[in-house]
Image (spheres, rainbow, N blue to C red):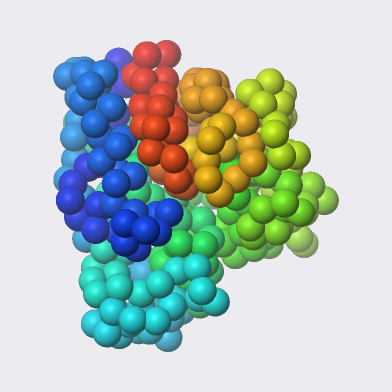
Amino acid sequence: MCNTAVFYGKELASYGFGQSHPFNSNRIYSFWSKFIALNIDKSNQITIEKPKLASKDALLQFHDKHYVDLVEESSKQGAGFLDVGDTPAFKGVFEASCYVVGSSLEALVLVMEKTNGILHAFTPIGGLHHARRGSAGGFCVFNDIGIMIMYAKKKYGLKRICYVDIDAHHGDGVYYEFEQDSSVYIADIHEDGRYLYPGTGNEGETGLGDAMGTKLNISLKPNSSDSDFISSFDKVEEFINSVAKPELIIFQCGADGIRGDPLTHLQYTSKAHSYATEKLHLLSHKHCNGRLVALGGGGYNQTNIADGWTAVIQSLINSV
């Protein structure tokens, strides 16, 4: 039996940019409402975990000190932007962002150490894949994924980490920061950058230097369907089996590729999330003793968020 930790609490809901902003606090509550309605919380394979606050030292595993200091100061002022205009500061943004990072790091620790038999973990407000070492980007203040990767390498000595991203937006803040790192394998399925922020993730981008061939970018045209996603994900499965052979899988399962998202043009259903999770679940048991951490990522249609994220968790507890 695979135990799965799910993180939830008002501290994670504090990471939001106001009710009129696409990334608002309603996102986590929409997910939680369906999670409870489906009685997933009653499963003996589910453990509910409270959010955890990351230390400033943890942020500095990945981010530049001048940027961390900027966010901390902007958090006190509660005004201005942390990038060119997508990611506004608000009072308490530093602490809210630290809860996102801390929860993702705790998810990693639980999985790596198999605490209480936990092999998998899901945190809904995580997967902030646009933040760079020295700046915010695309609603992402601190890159919890990058911090997790650095922590996994330093604390646990991992040499083969696989990051899989199915968010409609390319995970530029992860890809470019690890583009030359041969220990980080990246498979990213996203909407073609010619039609969507951040405009990156060309299929010719496969890594640089010693890391050439350790990255896989798959870009899909607007209106791509579940069948397009599934055929693309089969390439991800082959990449993991033949190239990555990971010791840990980190899965960014953004729900903004589901039909009806206000910011994107893809036409998936939550079946795409079920399919990807089922495959990654099997792969995690094949290659890395079940070590799989899933992060909610994007998604700006409340129904889609609820459907996509609960599909991920159900796939983790219903297979293998």
Quadrant holding the C terminus: top left
Q: Quadrant of residue 223?
A: top right
* Residue drawn 49% across the image and 25% down it: 270
* Residue drawn 41% across the image and 20% down it: 315
Q: Position of residue 319 (x, y in %)?
A: 42, 14
Q: Position of residue 259 (x, y in %)?
A: 56, 32
* Residue drawn 54% across the image and 25% down it: 269
Q: Position of residue 80 (x, y in %)?
A: 40, 81
Q: Nearer the viewer, residue 202 or 269?
A: 269
Q: Quadrant of residue 32?
A: top left
**Side (left or right) of 11 relative to 150:** left
**Side (left or right) of 245 relative to 114:** right
Most extreme residue toward the right is 204
Residue 181 visible to an observer of this rendering: no
**Residue 261 position (above or below residue 200):** above
Q: Position of residue 61 (x, y in %)?
A: 41, 69
* Residue drawn 30% across the image and 15% down it: 1
**Residue 115 position (above or below residue 191):** above
